[in-house]
Amino acid sequence: MSMEDYDFLFKIVLIGNAGVGKTCLVRRFTQGLFPPGQGATIGVDFMIKTVEINGEKVKIDHFGFEQDLTFLQRYLVADQHWRKDNGSILFYTGNEGDITWFCNNTGFMWDVAEELNAMLVFAEHRYYGESLPFGNKSYSDSKHLNYLTSEQALADFAKLIQHLKETIPGAQNAPVIAIGGSYGGMLAAWFRMKYPHMVVGALAASAPIWQFEDLVPCGIFYSIVTNDFKKSGPLCSESILNSWGAINRISSTVEGLKWLSSAFRLCSPLKTKQDVAVLKSWLSDMWVNLAMVNYPYKADFLQPLPAWPVQVVCKFLKNPKLSDKLLLQNVFQAANIYYNYTGAASCLNTSQSATRNLGLTGWYYQACTEMVMPMCTDGVNDMFEPRKWNFQEFSEECFKLWKVRPRPSWIVSVYGGKNIISHSNIVFSNGGLDPWSGGGVTRNITDSLIAIVIPEGAHHLDLRASNPGDPKSVLQARAMEVQYMKQWIEKSRHKL
């Protein structure tokens, strides 16, 4: 490929001392490999990585006939290891965020591409990233948001695969495997269920497809979060549980509000009860997110964090019987790990709890329509303030925000809930440390609806790139996943 064939050409020069791993880093970036036995190289290594960024026009409404409006759906293609004669396609079912961010955090696909002779396709979910059906009006009101549903997204994916097979030489008969994590994992599983003629199988990582209605207890999510902290430090979860009362007591006075604002180095000082509620929600999100990304090595998925971050923050939370101010000063130390591990922030912003690559506004809308996941806490089986699941209250809040009412039974009606025994070729992987595993499939349903549990795994750890810090359980899980994918590919070829 000549320089004229590129829309953008970036040249990166890596300079460093001999023997520090420059070639390993370059090969990791360009080839998806990190060879621990890499020998020393002499002179200059020159390597190229190509990623195609494309767009495909798809219908805004796949299920109606009155309008024929379309929008440009973004997708990424990497075909370094694609073989036209016997290659496969690994298709990432994009979730609630910018697809480039998910592409960069799904190293597993890059790691296995050569072994499976695979083309990698990362499809962006409508209404996220740059795939906006109505441009800057997409979030203007519920009328424009009306087409933000999982069903429409799956139809987008189906049409994109059809387009790829029609336009890429050699792709017509290539078996396609859907891969996704979290909501994307739910979409991968549902894609195989609804479009089995499009994908020969699916890897659904950390996919809580049963976190609906009463399929699982509403408190299971926060119970798992709490257990992560219980296991990571003596009296850690008890300290967090006691911190809510400490916040309530100190925030009851004007002086207390000033102290809290200063102690937590907040960018905006606390002035009202609502501000205090926001602070507590911000801290709750932090505890949840720490459990989700409790990876065994440094990572920056939601925030830049150290290895085993729950253990790190629990070092500050060893004594739940401290005075209110001392206890909350320790909570601040923990918060500063999550929100300011790099030390770059001069103050902490309670309006932001995770990376901006996530499309939280769109997800809130989806939660207010079809993605209704009941959650509750009791302060006994978990480390949070008691809060019952109140659907009516939730519905009123959704109507106030979006002028829509949630449909709590819809997902179960459309995708089957626990009645999915008629489907096949889906691997559900879940991490034992991941709060979302409570709503996931953790036991085999049939010999082709497989559950893989990774005891030391947090949120879709298996989809992340191979790392020297990976526990043995995730290495075994990835090996099993690749083995199932090979079986699906081989079986599909015999049907041709």
Image (cartoon, rainbow, N blue to C red):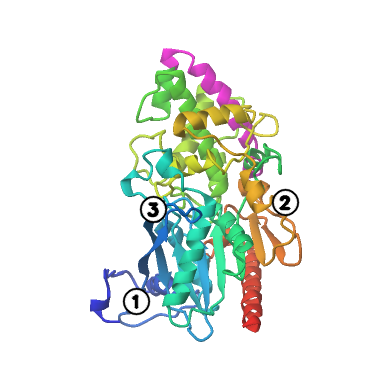
| Circle nearer the viewer, 2 or 1 | 2
For mark 3, what is the residue?
A: 129
For mark 1, what is the residue?
A: 48
2 lies above or below 386: below
**Is 6 situated left or right of 355 in this image?**
left
Q: Amino acid at mark 1?
A: Ile
Give residue 414's position: percent from left, percent from top: 63, 50
Q: What separation in Å lies between label 2 and label 1 (alpha carbons)?
A: 46 Å
Please identify the dominant SS of the magenta region. helix
Which type of secondary structure does the marked residue at label 2 adopt? loop
Farthest-out residue, left: 4
Res 418 label: 2
Graded by Cα atoms within 10 Å as few (under 14), some (14 to 19) or many (20 or more), the crowding at tag 3 reads many
- At x 47%, y 79%, the residue is 82
Q: Which residues are magenta?
A: 227-256
Q: Within the image, what quadrant is residue 444 found in?
A: bottom right
Q: What separation in Å lies between label 3 and label 1 (alpha carbons)?
A: 26 Å
